[in-house]
Amino acid sequence: MSSSLKTSPGQNIRELLQSGEVIAALDWFTREADAITREHIEICSIPASPFQETARAEYLRDKFLELDLTEVEIDAEGNTIGLLKGNSLKPLIVVSAHLDTVFPPGTDFTVRRDGDILLAPGISDDGCGLAAVVAIARAFRKNNINTAGSVLFVCTVGEEGEGNLRGVRHLFTKSRWAKRVDAFLSFDGPGIDRITNRALGSRRYRVELHGTGGHSWGDFGIPNPVHALGRAIARLAAYPAPLEPRTTFNVGRIAGGTSVNAIPTSASMEVDLRSADDAELRRIDAYFRRTLGQSVDEENGERRTGDATLDVQLKLIGERPSGETSPESMIVELAQEATSLLGREARLDQSSTDSNLPISIGIPAITLGAGGTSGSSHTLDEWYDPRDRDMSLKRGFLLILGMVGTPK
């Protein structure tokens, strides 16, 4: 029995399900459900704040070594990498999840249990994805599943926030694997029906305003950086964001000032702009930059004679490319077929994930849910329910095996 990137997806998956070794591997995910959850808890208990993913990366490196993967390393950007080598390096599919969370240093990452529910910052995003990567690598090894092509397991840094996809960007532009990958699969968050084949583009800015500051009474009239930001935020909030194509904006952080009766010397904010359509993203981006200038000009325009104007610093801190992996591509069709054969209805969607980068450079890429359910993502109350997690792991396993094939 053999399969390849050119095999009919339906035939490919059905042939795999006729193999006793593959059936045993699928059953393994169900039998090992509790062990997978324990591994999940271990991973998420290791702090992984933005740009501080090293401890978690080292833990995953040790797991890859235990599983006898080859080419195991933490690369120059901080990604953890391990190769499951088949008969050939072609085709080569990357299977990934991201190491980082959105939570700052000092966050308590201790995992608590409430019955079946796991509670911890990052327990779903992307703790369940990392658990999926380890579980799938282990399923290949424990069940002695040989492959025609090869699987590169990668745990990436910098997927969240200001990380700006730095891990996957390095993988595809600077690493020794950059020109060798044929397809890309990431696990991010929960669920089994979702297949993210469209990349949601975004642009993120940090705005900093600096002035002379002064006393709120005696120096009234000096340009106030907070007031200028307030004008800009009000204008952004009034933007007529279309529902179709869906377009969003958010001021996620604002800071400045030292006292209620002091005109601040500086103020800053961070802004996230997203759209399902490139043209609309460019439109809201241009609107934001234009109205920021207008807001600062207005604040400066009301200053007293001789007062200094505000200094503006606008920095692009994140830019995620958009694009689409065709619904007719092998990887999408295999994911749909595997979902269907497991009794679920596949749903194509659009989101911002590590897949954005490979999609933008023409590499077939999708992101899947890692099973289970979750809520309160990106908050300290984040939770994850691992029940039925095995369904998604089976789906991912079948998809990967369908892509790399089995030896003749």
Image: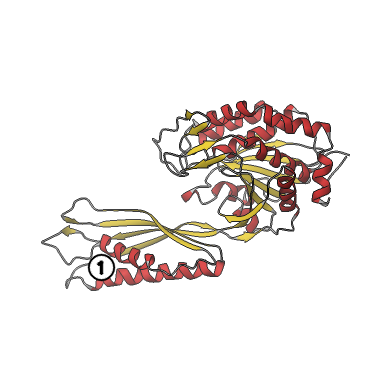
Q: Nearer the viewer, residue 11 or 309?
A: 11
Dot 1 amino acid type: Thr
In the rendered image, the quadrant that contains the C terminus is top right
- Front residue of this view, candidates 246 and 154: 246
Q: Position of residue 113 (x, y in %)?
A: 48, 28
Residue 110: % across, % down: 45, 30
Q: In this figure, which residue is indicated by the disc labeled 1?
A: 309
| Residue at the limit of the structure toward the front, as seen here | 343
Query: What residue lies at 47% left-to-right and 44% top-to-bottom?
Result: 377
Q: Would you say residue 145 is visible in this rendering?
A: no
280 left or right, relative to 179:
left
Choose between 377 and 148: the one closer to the eye. Answer: 377
Name the residue located 38 percent from the left edge and 68 percent from the top edge.
238
| Residue 255 image position (x, y, % from top left) | 31, 52
Q: Residue lying furthest left in this view? A: 218
Q: Secondary structure at mark 1?
A: loop
Question: Circle 1: is it few (<14), some (14-19), or many (20+) Cα within 10 Å?
Answer: many
Residue 51 versus residue 39 in the image, above or below: below
Left or right of 194, for residue 49: left
How many marks do you count on the picture? 1
User: In what quadrant of the picture does the N terminus appear?
Assistant: top right
Left or right: 170, with 315 as reference point: right
Q: Nearer the viewer, residue 16 or 217?
A: 16
Q: Position of residue 267 (x, y in %)?
A: 29, 56
Q: Which quadrant of the structure image shows residue 35?
A: top right
Which of the 4 image quadrants contains residue 381? top left
Which color mode does the image show? secondary structure
Determine if residue 282 is in view.
yes
